[in-house]
Amino acid sequence: MTDVLLRGGRPWGQAGPADLLIRDGVIHRSAPALDAPGARVIDITGQLVLPGLVEAHCHLDKTLYGGAWVPHSADDTLSGRIGNDLARRAELGIPSVARIVTLLERMSAHGTVAVRTHTDIDPAAGLRGVEAVRAAAAQVPVDVRQVAFPQHGLLTNPGTAELLEDALAGGSSGPGGVDAVGGLDPAGIDRDPVRHLDLIFGLAERHGAHLDIHLHDGGSLGAWELELITERTRVLGLGGRVTVSHAYALGQIDDAHAGRLADGFAAAGVAVATAAVYSFPLPPVKRLRAAGVTVACGHDGIRDLWGPYGSGDMLERAMHLAYRSTFRGDADIELALEAATYGGARALGLAGYGLAEGDRADLVVVPAGGGAEAVVVHPPRTLVMKDGAVLHN
Amino acid sequence: MTDVLLRGGRPWGQAGPADLLIRDGVIHRSAPALDAPGARVIDITGQLVLPGLVEAHCHLDKTLYGGAWVPHSADDTLSGRIGNDLARRAELGIPSVARIVTLLERMSAHGTVAVRTHTDIDPAAGLRGVEAVRAAAAQVPVDVRQVAFPQHGLLTNPGTAELLEDALAGGSSGPGGVDAVGGLDPAGIDRDPVRHLDLIFGLAERHGAHLDIHLHDGGSLGAWELELITERTRVLGLGGRVTVSHAYALGQIDDAHAGRLADGFAAAGVAVATAAVYSFPLPPVKRLRAAGVTVACGHDGIRDLWGPYGSGDMLERAMHLAYRSTFRGDADIELALEAATYGGARALGLAGYGLAEGDRADLVVVPAGGGAEAVVVHPPRTLVMKDGAVLHN
């Protein structure tokens, strides 16, 4: 591959402008006024260079993206949405490889380079979702990683645990590999938090997998489940491989309690992923970061039977996170951008992520004066690069 | 002016497609397959036609829009933001006619045809903000109406009441006319709710003006102030001319209490304007509409010293309103679009607003299958028309 020289950009978080010389898929050199004979030179003077965006929580298998508008048809309860989802997915051809490809292409055009997606696994659907996401991931230059997700219950849905095991046994290698096991409201949905958590932590340990658990359970119930998750992460030595998604409870309990949980997460190595959806409670991002907790960000559903919103643009999603967090100052707004970049990369365990020499050349260039402006304005991307290849320019 | 025939669009809220014949600034005819010799024909087959968008609550005089990014510099208190605003506006050249023009042009490109803007009036600034908005409004084809707004206190800031009177005496005619008096947290900020309200209601009555009062005061305090506002509107017969902006209290009190206040608003003719900003409490839009209360929508500040967010796109703003309201179904999402169109028009008292024959030809065309999709996706506009003139196509 010909070398590429990105001329005059301002790498986010660095003191000044730098030219970036891309060779063999990595950032080979980063310094002002580089000389690079034979390289393809792309002038991005004055523009912001970000590491590629990381979508840390979505549901590719459910998406209706790219098709005609489908009016939302579920009632306003969680059980109603689950029932509606089960009833209508065949009619609508879900999962659809074509629709997943369309969405992944859109994400890529917005600068997303890595995606963690929670794929429904249950006795009715089997592993069809997993296979559809694998097939789609093979077609788009985005690093897609799947979570084997018991959307329709685990203990309450016999046969699901065995399917999760099968999905993990299918392996984490290749496009759309399954490298994580999921969970869902061990108390509120699955009715037996201890057995639910023991089961999924056991799966994660046995398969050397990550664990990413949906926790909508609120208030003191959710907070207590967060303690159970922290304990298991610490005792099993799974630090750095465990993420709690949504974690509404952190936004509902008092500050001191949230602070104690945050300290526990930091010590045990539990990350938090948030999508900042609707008006639902939001984890206290600033407090979590101050405690040293990894915070990641994703869309949750994008244009699916659970709700019609979402664009696939992680800068726009970071705006929602910053806005809902009432972040006004640049440093605060950049916490949301950190979640959509480095935070997501840590949660997913991405290797060689960043803007330093030797890091993978997964980059996005934005016409913005700084990280805060990039989030607030989320303008069209100037350039997206994955593994050194220029994708959108 | 040459007639314009918009061919094949689907007017929002009507049963099927219709051609719209625009003549002399109004919708002259609306019917399928119109014949219009000599007209300029614009094919918009299959696209959605909305009445022009209405920005019912913003602060044009404060905007930094169109300039370089200005990092937010105020602390996280209301008094801190007010002090920072006062300290920095001269340094930043606020109010700036050029910046207001830039923002109005952007709003117009997004399909906004009418704007209510709250302009700071105080002894330090005098009427400079009012004059700047008038000068800008004369340059852009948007119907701009100003609220004489005591941002820095009314009773607590001697001389302000007289300046509000001067602003109203300057008249409501012409671009950027002052046709409303404002107010601000009669209890929380101005410390004497009865005298504050009596003063601004007196001004509204004497000048035949509208009244649009900022009410951030929350909980039972704000709810009680809403009762005071309803009583005065009813007794003075000002129904249809009074709007409460923000009205956070409605989102904090219990449902039954909010329902009683909503019924009072409907009977007295009090409208509610919301911007759905940050994570602040949101008035219950669906309940208000069910009670027959007019609900309008606006951005609040756009890129100013109070916060860096905002694009000027009222379809995007309607998305925020729908999203924060957890509206998923089409009919619910269209309540947000109603607020950004007809609701705003009723609150502002716009004449001849709508999509019927005889209405003003203030239109926006969107490549969307329906109102809900237009809100969720808020795609670039295909065409914007103001008083029959094609502005963006």
Image (spheres, coloured by chain):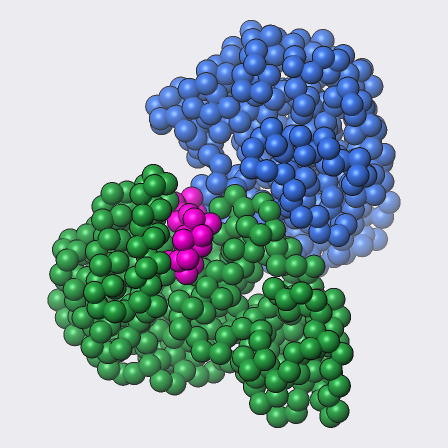
Chain colours: A blue, B green
Locate residue B372 relative to residue A89 in the image: left or right. left
Is residue A228 shown above or below A51?
Answer: above
Locate residue B159 relative to residue B112 in the image: left or right. left
Q: Quadrant of residue B229?
A: bottom left
Image point (54%, 16%), residue name: A187
Q: Position of residue A86 (x, y in %)?
A: 72, 30
Image point (47%, 31%), residue name: A283
Q: Nearer the viewer, residue B362 or A283?
A: B362
Is residue B277 shown above or below B67?
Answer: above
Q: Position of residue B161 (x, y in %)?
A: 17, 70
Q: Nearer the viewer, residue B162 or A334?
A: B162
Chain part drawn in magenta: B272-295
Is residue A213 shown above or below A162?
Answer: below
Q: Quadrant of residue B204?
A: bottom left
**Magenta run includes residue A286:** no
Image point (25%, 43%), residue name: B220
Total marks drawn? 0
**Magenta run includes residue B273:** yes
In which quadrant of the rendered image does the N terminus of chain A lie?
A: top right
Locate residue B242 relative to residue A378 in the image: left or right. left
Image point (37%, 44%), residue name: B251
Q: Position of residue B304 (x, y in %)?
A: 40, 60
Q: Position of residue A393 (x, y in %)?
A: 75, 56
